[in-house]
Amino acid sequence: MSAIIVEGLGKRYLLSHRGRMVEGYLRDAITSAARSLGRALSLRGKGSGDERDEEFWALSDVSFRIEEGERVGIIGRNGAGKSTLLKILSRITRPTTGEVRIRGRAASLLEVGTGFHGELTGRENIFLNGAILGMTKAEIHRKFDAIVDFSGVERFLDTPVKRYSSGMYVRLAFAVAAHLESDILLVDEVLAVGDAEFQKKCLGKMEDIGKEGRTVLFVSHNMNAIEQLCTKCLLLDKGRLALQSNDVRSVITDYLYGFESGPAVSEWSSSGEEFRNPWFRPVRFAITDGRGRKRPMPVANNEEAWIWVEGEITEADPALKVGYAIFSDDGLLLYWTFHTDLPESKWPALGKGTWILRSRIPPKLLNEGSYRVELIGMLHRRIWLFEPAVNAPGIYMTIWGGLSNSPYWMERRPGLFAPVMEWTASPAGSA
Amino acid sequence: MKKLVKLRENSGTIRAGRLAKEQEREIIIRPEGGLNRYWRDFWQYRDLLSFLTWRDVLARYKQTVLGVAWSLIRPIVTMVVFTLVFGKLAGLPSGDAPYPVLVYAALLPWQFFSVSVSESGNSLVNNANLITKVYFPRLIIPIGALAVGLVDFLVSVVVYAGLMAYYGFLPDWRIATVPLFLLLAIGVSLGFGLWFAALMVKYRDFRHVLPFLVQVGLFLSPVGFNSAIVPEKWRILYSLNPMVGVIDGFRWALLRGTTPLYLPGVFLSVGLTSIVLWGGIRYFRRTEQAFADVI
């Protein structure tokens, strides 16, 4: 049983020559009417003048089908059309082309606390917001206690919400929305607000909603939440449906790892001509699982990944240093490392022939993000074979997920690194 | 095993029941048309109508102590000024009724009209955040905004009662017809309110035009004077302003018929109100779909 059927959906916006949405001002309408009247009188034909409206398709030719009880994540870059899609599904705006069929009562939550009024108390706002979201008075009465309980603001129920902290405000607002009795729930990026604990509560609630057999559509930039919550994932790109699959992780991977730039670039292979030299000619440079198989991206922070360097040596030189440099996606160098970093006795011995050098990327070190890894090759203090940020072969790696098992650490934190540190506590005075 | 089978059967019936419910609830979204559910939705969202009304009234009277005072001061000051200018300076006739009572009887519907039209005219733009974030039949917003005018009206009625007691000028049976004329006033206000609300979304600077239009309307309507002073041959032309019929009706009902009712004017007002209201609803419904895109 399909809950939502979308066929050939498109939405066009007109941007006027001034670069804003077509609406306008009475004075413009009057002057342009006068101008066109003048033109008609002077019989100069229908010159288009400066009324050039520019078209912009926020969505085009999107078709998909969502079964009852599916939890669907919608991802894509800003401006990919995610919000427009939700707005059409929630009947806020009409499509320009195509058709949508929705079976069941749909409720949308595009913003937390829509219609909240600062002067009104928490209690009053529960009723107001509930009604705005489509609940009847009787329904709100019935759910009132559960809503208050979920929000955890019962002590401030009779305080005007303008005195609430932003956290309380969000909690109350989400609590109302979470108790909507709808068959289909459309949610847009509401979890971006609130503290970690509350976010977890929200995710849990949405999971419950899904388990009750209700259908959930969820737009988010939080890939962890999407992976945790969804059974299906849609990827929008420039208004088109680029991918859809029940393999949520693979869609996320493609999104993070650049579905636009073609095949993943976590591997570099020599065409045979580059970096031709007798000391170390690189053949393959890749991020692998340790046995030479290409490592699918992204790599979770707590998973293993190995740098794999394959090269040909025709003239062994003891000064050879092979390693890699790693840069964050904004170009910051994180570190260099060489195969000669340990005491000399522990260096891997390299003679003539083809060699594979491997190095484990330490887990639980790098933060979520994408990284560029560049190969370094040099003869110590003599010559660069390939120099990072100058001419070295580079590959990309994405770290995502697996940050920690803590309920308070669900998504990317600020900082370059995301090591999991140990903490201990002892009563003051004893140490 | 038996239990399992039983469970399955149960879920089967639940599903079937649900299926029927869902088919009944299928929503089709297309570029055009398909709004057969509109009035049904409107009915389903009736609680929202009452909550929005309640919010507007509460917010209006909560924010300032002046909230209530303001809805008292405005008509009283207007009454005093009009009595001085039209009654004393111009020496216009007032029939048997005292001049302040004559003016105030007209101010009741006029104030309702001006507050309601401004409130509902501005209502869509003021609720832009709702319009871009949630679906509901948009008609609810301007209709809900009328309620603010209605509350002000009730406050004014109390003042009017005091005024009548002061002048010892009590109404007769005709006062029972006031609800009919109030209904007509609601029709006029909603009709214009819907036009202005929809136009304001389209033309932002309409916001500045609206108060001006309301001001002009005040001078075109027989608020400060009795419409009986209008020469007979111009009377029907004067009645093209639908508020003329409303105001005359209020005066006739509240002032014991001391100003005779000009019936052609009332009928004209009813006819024009129907046209404005019908056109307003149609224009509103036609432009409604694009509100979220342009607001």
Image (tube, rainbow, N blue to C red):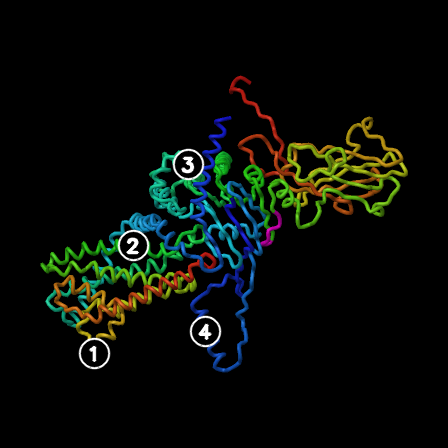
Q: Mark 1 and mark 3, same subunit? A: no
Amino acid type for the residue under numbered disc 3: Ser
Amino acid type for the residue under numbered disc 2: Val
Residue A129 horizontal side relative to residue A212, left or right: left
Residue A242 in the magenta stretch? The answer is yes
Asked whether B287 or A196 is in front, the reply is B287
The quarter holding residue A333 reads top right
Q: Point out the stretch of residues depicted in magenta.
A: A238-243
Residue beneath disc 2 = B148
- Quadrant position of the C terminus of chain A in the picture: top right
For the residues marked 1 and 3, what is the alpha-carbon distance in whole angstroms? 68 Å
**Residue at the extreme left of the image, as rendered:** B168
Amino acid type for the residue under numbered disc 1: Lys
State the mark number for residue A80: none
The quarter holding residue B251 reads bottom left
For the residues marked 2 and 4, what is the alpha-carbon distance in whole angstroms? 36 Å
Disc 2: CA contacts within 10 A as few (<14), some (14-19) or many (>=20): many
Q: Chain of mark 1?
A: B
State the mark number for residue B233: 1
Residue beneath disc 4 = A33
For the residues marked 1 and 2, what is the alpha-carbon distance in whole angstroms? 38 Å
Q: Chain of mark 2?
A: B
Q: Chain of mark 4?
A: A
Q: Mark 1 and mark 2, same subunit? A: yes
For the residues marked 2 and 3, what is the alpha-carbon distance in whole angstroms? 32 Å
> Of the residues under marks 3 and 4, which one precedes in the sequence?
4
Amino acid type for the residue under numbered disc 4: Ala
